[in-house]
Amino acid sequence: MGRLFGTDGVRGVANADLTAELALGLSVAAAHVLAEAGTFEGHKPVAVVGRDPRASGEFLEAAVVAGLASAGVDVLRVGVLPTPAVAFLTGELGADLGVMLSASHNAMPDNGIKFFARGGHKLADELEDRIEGVYEEHRTGAPWERPTGAGVGRVRSYDDGSGRYVEHLLSVLPNRLDGIKVVLDEAHGAAAGVSPEAFTRAGAEIVTIGAEPDGLNINDGCGSTHLGPLKAAVLEHGAHLGIAHDGDADRCLAVDHEGNEVDGDQILAVLALAMRERSTLRADTVVATVMSNLGFKLALEREGLRLVQTAVGDRYVLEEMKEHGYALGGEQSGHVIISDHATTGDGTLTGLLLAARVAQTGRTLQELAGVMERLPQVLINVPDVDRSRVSTSAELAAAVAEAEGELGSTGRVLLRPSGTEPLVRVMVEAADIEQARSVAGRLADAVKSALG
């Protein structure tokens, strides 16, 4: 698998890349590393462990629980819950560690392990590196120091997790959803129970699809990566809007009453204006990645708001938010982080707040999302090139400068080397789709010429 930890934990094909042995070993390593860092000092450590409904999550959960308990950590098993719920409960219950088993929007054969630090925050990169190093050291033969007798961890089910999480969601809503009809696509995933309950208790009339997880059908033709069924259901039922989650419900994409997609940039724009109105948008700033549509940036500028951009990945958005105390950030893909109420992207919370804005204003989601115009965006992947020379090639720099001159202030160029493959991604935005395609094609040719 190469380096085990990616930008969002450890992922791979369950029982091939991500085995029970790996899950157990990483859990033991995490317990030892956090103990060495002083996280457990002076008390018996406690971990919260949750999962999405994938079939492989059943045996991987058993492995993680066994590993933690064997290392002296008491375990609270919260069962099938969204990633943001596990993060919330890690903080709410004062746990020293949280573990989520999920591969998010990936297909069912995959699974993943994500660790949360005390408070429900993602582990720092240096701790992940240390966990991986300790795991490798012991995998090759170095014996673990193991507690015995009363020193081993105890395991129990914690059945109040769903209820506490829903109560939390309802407590932060600025207004009720009475009179709003919402279609919820749960991706046959981790939010199939909590999301319909939260929306119903908030006053919405709901229609659910993709809410019958069987361990095999997660993300299968539904959810935030397949919006077709949601669009059809919104039109069929005459709903005000539709909300789509991914398998672990840390994402939210939406559909307006006419079946038009509302992406993460548009959701951020709607929520930014709502939060400014309530004086909760600190420093009038939103954090997003460099892949956000230029139309989003132009919309924020028109509204007198500031956009701070980071590298691609919600962990980088979160790092920027934590460092400067910003309250709202996210990605075009639907990861939306509202730091006053969540330590990670929370699709259910995002959907509730979006519906609350519709209910409060009496405007359609289409009208609200119209605050920004998505500029046409063309993305071309150029394979089999030397991605390491993207920033140093004079030939490529000249081609980019020429393209930027042609596009002016209403267009944008982004060249990004892939983090995992020998290719370069060429992204061009322009006011006109044909111009975007033309410029992107020429730049793709320039990448081949300069880096091939």
Image (tube, rainbow, N blue to C red):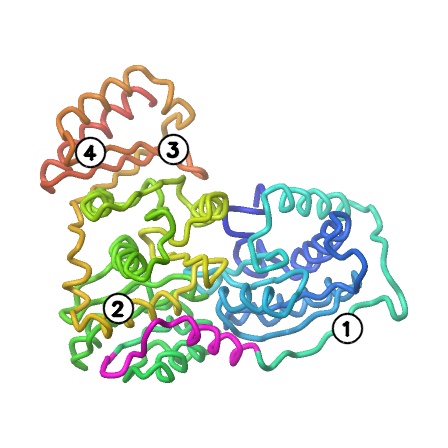
Could you give the CA–CA distance between mark 1 and mark 3, rounded to whole angstroms? 46 Å
Which of the two residues, 57 or 399, is positioned nearer the viewer here? 399
Could you give the CA–CA distance between mark 4 and mark 1, rounded to whole angstroms? 58 Å
Instruction: From the image, tell me which residue sits under label 4.
Output: 440
Q: Residue at x 42, y 49 (%)?
A: 326
Q: Quadrant of the C terminus?
A: top left
SS state under label 4: helix
Tell me, yes or no, whether the two marked residues, 4 and 2, touch with CB atoms within 8 Å: no
Tell me, yes or no, whether the two marked residues, 1 and 2, touch with CB atoms within 8 Å: no
Q: Amino acid at mark 2?
A: Arg
Instruction: From the image, tell me which residue sits under label 3.
Output: 417
Residue pushed farthest right?
149
Q: Nearer the viewer, mark 1 or mark 2?
A: 2
Tag count: 4
Q: Nearer the viewer, mark 2 or mark 3?
A: 2
Badge 2: residue crowd in 10 Å (few <14, some 14–19, many ≥20): many
Q: Is residue 221 visible?
A: no
SS state under label 3: strand
Disc nearer the start of the sequence (1/2): 1
Q: Which quadrant of the structure image shows residue 448? A: top left
SS state under label 2: helix
Instruction: From the image, tell me which residue sits under label 1.
Output: 154
Q: Which mark is residue 357?
A: 2
Q: Amino acid at mark 3?
A: Pro
Q: Residue at x 38, y 54 (%)?
A: 328
Could you give the CA–CA distance between mark 4 and mark 3, rounded to whole angstroms? 15 Å
Tell me, yes or no, whether the two marked residues, 4 and 1, touch with CB atoms within 8 Å: no
Magenta residues?
161-181
Tell me, yes or no, whether the two marked residues, 2 and 3, touch with CB atoms within 8 Å: no
